[in-house]
Image (spheres, rainbow, N blue to C red):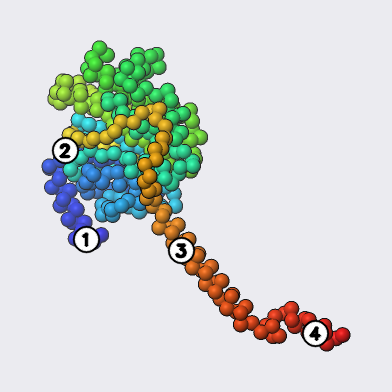
Amino acid sequence: MGRAGMMLWALAAAFLAGVSGDEFSVLRSPQSVVFRDGSWPIPGERIPDIAALSMGFSVEEDLSWPGLAVGDIFHRPRATVLVTVKGVDKLVIPKDGISYPVENAVPFSLDSVANAIHTLFSEETPVVLQLAPSEERVYMVGKANSVFEDLSVTLRQLRNRLFQDNSILSSLPLNSLSRNNEVDLLFLSELQVLHDISSLLSRHKHLAKDHSPDLYSLELAGLEEIGKRYGEDSQQFKDASQILADSLQKFADEMYNLYGGNAVVEVVTAKTFDTPLVRKSRSILQTAQSTSYNLGYSYNFNYAVVFNIVLWLMIGLALAVIVISYNLWNMDPGYDSIIYRMTNQKIRMD
């Protein structure tokens, strides 16, 4: 990108900084994934493409965003963790991270990234977890079903989990938040989910060392409900924002360390989304079921590679058969064949 292009990006970033405060923040990332310092705006609908490119996957449409550099193509991260926080445009994260403004914050999902992982690493059963606790929406495939079998996913389970002996209520300073308010408990239950994910994964550290990449997509709406209940200028909202920021940084550090420093942890904060995201809910116990409708196979990105390998191999074999057949047909037995030469010399000696 030339100097003129960089200036245009800077002007766009300065303009959008006054229009929208939504942010895309990178809390932790390995050295193989390079995020540049800058204020380049990210189109909200391209956030899944950024996650895919950082994992080394290709995308259908080129992304001309200068914030993500090429990095080390031979060492890609073992995991990508993306947390979406609704109801706030910015969180003050304790540690120094890299943040970019989000342009046109629209609902998104990482289904395309999950499908790419399924396609390329289907035999290795990677860990894929997509979870929205407040909506009781969860999707687990691969080894996630065994790792997070005890994870609370329904509102009733989350409430019961909070009042167990080893919950975060025993160590988390609530400040102005209350244990007797349903809205506060919803917010605290999402923090409990963050704690349980890293805790359950720590019992299966061997999964963080395999060669298949893992994906975690979490959607938190508890802070948004706190703002609706008490108001964004209330002490409860301020305390909840600070508690969430601290919890997210702790969660990012834990996941980063579990994967040996080879994980990308990102946070998207959005005040409101322009349009609602309509998705089909999927169950934690969902199994792969196939129904035949006499349809063709879904397109695979490796199709072009396999097609070219098979095509040119067949052409090469065909040409080899033609050349060999032509030479055999026009061969002179008396001069070209070693069998006839040896036979003639033996006859002469006799």
Instruction: Identify the residue position indicated by label 4 in the image.
Output: 345
Separation (CA) of disc 1 from disc 2: 33 Å
Could you tell me which secondary element the residue under label 2 belongs to? loop
Q: Is the residue 243 above or below the residue 128 in the image?
A: above
Tell me the amino acid under the disc marked 4: Gln
Q: Looking at the image, which residue is at 24% across and 28% down?
A: 221
Query: Would residue 327 appear left or right of 173 to someone viewing this image?
Result: right
Of tags 2 and 3, the one toward the viewer is 3
Image location of residue 142, percent across then percent down: 44, 35
Image location of residue 344, percent across then percent down: 78, 84
Separation (CA) of disc 1 from disc 3: 44 Å
Q: Looking at the image, which residue is at 40% across and 17% down?
A: 166
Marks 1 and 3, the one that precedes in the sequence: 1
Query: Which quadrant of the structure image shows residue 332?
Result: bottom right
Marks 1 and 2, the one that precedes in the sequence: 1
Marks 4 and 2, the one that precedes in the sequence: 2
Q: Is the residue 53 above or below the residue 283 in the image?
A: below
